[in-house]
């Protein structure tokens, strides 16, 4: 029960207290009636001994007045005086019960409020999102990149376990522990790639994030994890280079694409100039011979992918340069 819920229950609690007080006061009216009857008799037989406005006397005051004044005491029968004492006793008991009950309810209310205000609030996870850590992906989840999972947490901070689950294989990654207040965690590709079943070019896998708190389980909406393509340029000996598209270090069959490798090179006694290899690569025709008369500065080499795939899911890699 939250603080607002507790406060919303206070009217019922106070209403019950008021009913109890009213009930006891109603039962105490007999004592007041006895007092009025005795006051009425004394006003008839000894009006000069009575104070102003005697009808306002309570049983306790009237009893003290009668005990201190022998004239008034002689005018009151023993039965009436005993009734007055009984009324005093009843009034005392009623007061003790009413004030005691009110005190108990008041202390119980304070105790409940302190309990509600100080007890731990369980962690609640919401606003879960996932995105690639590579800026070139523009937030699109790609299985070649780290995956950043973000969330919003409410409640008292605690350690939570976060994992990724592939919807098609129903497999999960090993959970990673993080403080709920961190609001994000990153999964490296090698941590989640083994749970993905679709490894086809231009494919995708349905994935969701799973959060285990101390008391509850939370899952994110599922999102599409794109199968990334790596355009790789390989320096094969001193004579040639190869440009290929791969997934999981395996060449993509019948994959046509366009890419260019740029490197600065120079012939003897000439200034270096950029030289390009590649272009439209079709049906495996991806070997490009190097000119033996050129001196290549491989520290300047760059590989550029030109299409046709969505560039957000394509990464380039150089080997042997």
Image (tube, rainbow, N blue to C red):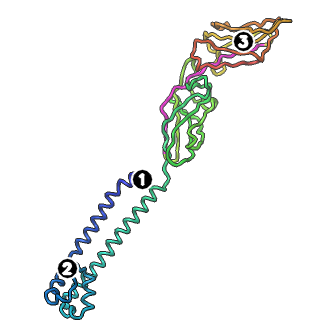
In x, y percent, where is residue 132? 58, 28
In this view, the residue farthest toward the left is: 44
The region drawn magenta spans 216-236
Q: Is residue 78 above or below residue 113?
A: below
Query: Residue under circle 1?
Result: 3
Q: Quadrant of residue 249?
A: top right
Tag of residue 262: 3
Asked whether 222 or 10 is in front, the reply is 10
* N-term-proximal mark, 3 vs 1: 1
Q: Report if the CB atoms under discs 3 and 2 are less than 8 Å apart.
A: no
Residue, far right: 269
Horizontal placement of 159 versus 75: left or right? Answer: right
Callout 1: SS: helix
Q: Residue at x 52, y 47 (%)?
A: 214
In the picture of the structure, the residue carrying the numbered disc 2 is 55
- Does the magenta stretch mainly form a helix, a strand or a loop? strand
- Residue 236 placement, left or right of 72: right
Cα distance between the residues tagged 2 and 1: 48 Å
Structural distance between the alpha carbons of marks 3 and 1: 67 Å
Q: Is residue 227 magenta?
A: yes
Q: Nearer the viewer, mark 3 or mark 2?
A: 2
Q: Residues within 10 Å of mark 3 (few under 14, many from 20)?
A: some
Q: Residue at x 57, y 16 (%)?
A: 310
Relative height, residue 189 to residue 315 (above, below): below
């Amino acid at each position: 029960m939250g603080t607002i819920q507790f406060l919303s229950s206070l009217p019922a609690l106070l209403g019950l207290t008021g009913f109890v007080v009213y009930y006891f006061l109603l039962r105490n009216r007999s004592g007041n009636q006895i007092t009025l009857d005795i006051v009425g008799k004394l006003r008839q037989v000894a009006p000069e001994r009575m104070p102003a406005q005697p009808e306002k006397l309570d049983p306790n005051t009237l009893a003290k007045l009668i005990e201190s004044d022998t004239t008034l005491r002689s005018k009151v029968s023993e039965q009436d005086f005993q009734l007055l004492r009984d009324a005093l006793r009843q009034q005392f008991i009623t007061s003790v019960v009413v004030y005691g009950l009110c005190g108990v309810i008041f202390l119980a209310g304070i105790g409940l409020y302190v309990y509600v205000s100080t007890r731990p609030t369980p962690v609640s996870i919401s606003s879960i999102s996932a995105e690639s850590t590579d800026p070139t992906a523009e937030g699109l989840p790609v299985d070649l990149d780290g995956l950043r999972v973000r969330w919003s947490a409410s409640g008292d901070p605690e350690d939570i376990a976060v994992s990724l689950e592939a919807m098609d294989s129903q497999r999960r990654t090993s959970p990673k522990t993080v403080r709920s207040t961190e609001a994000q965690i990153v999964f490296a590709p090698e941590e989640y790639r083994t749970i993905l079943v679709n490894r086809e070019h231009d494919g995708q896998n349905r994935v969701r994030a799973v959060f285990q708190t101390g008391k509850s389980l939370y899952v994110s909406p599922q999102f599409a994890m794109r199968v990334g393509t790596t355009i790789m340029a390989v320096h094969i000996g001193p004579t040639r280079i190869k440009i290929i598209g791969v997934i999981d270090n395996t060449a993509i069959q019948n994959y046509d694409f366009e890419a260019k490798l740029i490197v600065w090179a120079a012939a003897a006694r000439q200034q270096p100039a950029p030289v390009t290899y590649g272009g439209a690569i079709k049906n495996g025709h991806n070997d490009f011979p190097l000119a033996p008369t050129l001196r290549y500065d491989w520290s300047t080499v760059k590989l550029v992918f030109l299409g046709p795939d969505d560039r957000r899911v394509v990464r380039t890699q150089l080997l042997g340069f």
